Amino acid sequence: MSYSSPLGTPVTHTHLKSPAHLCDVSGMCANCTADCLGPCEIGLSAIRGAEAVNPFAADINQFASEKRYPLDFSAFTINGRVFGAQGCAEDADLATFPRVRLQSTFGRSAKVPLDAPFLLPAMAKLNWKDYFAGAALAGVPAVIGEDVVAKDKALEMADGRVTASPLLAAMVEAFQAHHRGAGRIILQGNFDDEAKGVLEHAITHLGVKAVELKFGQAAKGIQGYGKVPDLAEARRFQKMGYLIHPDPSDPAVAEAHAQGRGPVFEKIGKLPLWNPEGLIRRVAELRDLGAEQVCFKTGPFAPKDLRLILEIASEAGVDLVTFDGAGGGTGHSPVKMMNEWGIPTVQLEQLVFELARKLHHLGRPLPQIAIAGGFATEDQVFKGLALGAPYIGLVALGRAAMTAAMVGQRVGEALQAGEVPKEYACFGSSVEELFADLRILKGLYGSAAGSFAPGAIGVFSYLNRVSVGLRQLMALNRKFALEHLDRNDLIPLTEAAARATGLPTVQDLTRLEVEEMGK
């Protein structure tokens, strides 16, 4: 069998003529007929060329890897216990799952309370307004993604530096308008943002208290790039300091473009070329500007690079490092990079755990650590927290939370148009009837909750579902607070999972208990 996906997928808006009969080695149909128009990825490439490298309509969709990784969190089962209670009195009236404490904090010295150990990772497209608002309602941090200013038609700059960005201000306000003390809005900056002073502007003019430096461009590691439709727009981006290929200021290139010759213009993001000294200096500069939390975000790079990132974070006093595993959702990256690059989340988390444990044993201070990469439901969150304990304390829920924002928005729009989606008609015909957890928000915000956007309610409701499910799984293990989760709460189901993590299998645990009998 092949772990890779075939050359027909909705990610690229392609399909195979004979999907039941594949050549695993190539991903093509086993029988490629002379009369086939496609469009598999080969056929699409024949018509659209290099455009076929990327997902289809990336501005209105979100994507994830289709690769069937040999190891993921489904290769572990959750332990269960009968005796005792940790973090709660051994009293059946008190040891109930609603009493499980999910509260945490964000930040090393300046601590921000969190209502749950979740992080909504970087987004700056689709229904961003409800994504950020929903995070505030749920009391968890959310990250505004990179390159926002490039999308801001009302952007103002002077001497190559941002002086006003209404779009960025609106994203910050989407969170702040619903903030009730828990959680925090974080602004991410890539190498282009850094050159334009985006983080400085946000800290000094928008009141942003937490920022994040990204070790990559666009989705995880690749350079972000996208077509620029015309010469005037290409020159505008170039004037703003972006790399444009081919060079729109070259008269020969401009003439060729007008005649329909040569490659189309593309805006290409700069790859970060950090060094340890520069990063340590930059973290200090951001703190001096007023940032209370400075964070790092990295993809699943080589272990040597990840070790260096963690060591730099330790030395610089970074508050949070988010490690994003292969296989999770992305905003916009080449399809084959998304499927075939990087360390899958389970192996990445084990790697980070071992690095963090070593730093801890060396007496080095550790940043908070979050893990990302394909998490969507409470079982996956539990496994992510348990596998990384005690060093990894937050789980990022990006693609799933944005899905909740979009579904909530669409349902709200349907109700406003006088329609009740048939999928949910059994629950009622109004926002109050359909969104069951709106009553919780009314308890928190009073009558103001009645005006909340359905998309934001959707994000809150989704995160509440994950929270309740997580509490149930923790109570099953007699763990009534996050600090009591540990790696013994997981049992690998395969030899591969056991080898990758060093955790004992059911057979190992059985032998141990048999040996203990009669002692």
Image (cartoon, rainbow, N blue to C red):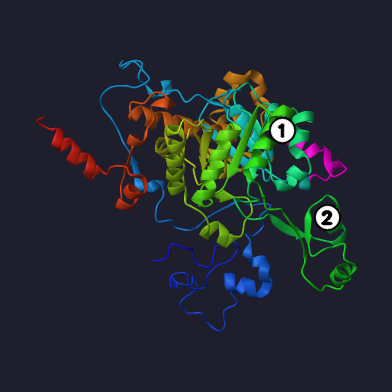
Q: Residue at horizontal 90%, vertical 67%?
A: 251
Q: Which class describes the residues within 10 Å of circle 2: few (<14), some (14-19), or many (20+)?
A: some
Judging by the rendered image, the residue that carries numbered circle 2 is 238
Q: Nearer the viewer, residue 288 or 215?
A: 288
Does residue 166 belong to the magenta stretch?
yes
Outermost residue, left side: 518
Does residue 51 belong to the magenta stretch?
no
Q: Earlier in the sequence, mark 1 or mark 2?
A: 2
Name the mark on residue 349. Answer: none
The quarter of the picture where the C terminus appears is: top left
Q: Residue at horizontal 74%, vertical 43%?
A: 194
Q: Mark 1: which amino acid?
A: Glu
Judging by the rendered image, the residue that carries numbered circle 1 is 285
Residue 100 on image: x %, y %: 42, 23
Does residue 343 appear to the left or right of 126 in the view shown?
A: left
Residue 483 lies in quadrant: top left
The quarter of the picture where the N terminus appears is: bottom left
Does residue 378 appear to the left or right of 95 in the view shown?
A: right
Residue 262 on image: x %, y %: 79, 72
**What span is colored magenta in the figure?**
152-172
- Element type at mark 1: helix
Q: Which class describes the residues within 10 Å of circle 1: few (<14), some (14-19), or many (20+)?
A: few
Tell me, yes or no, if residue 391 can be seen here: no
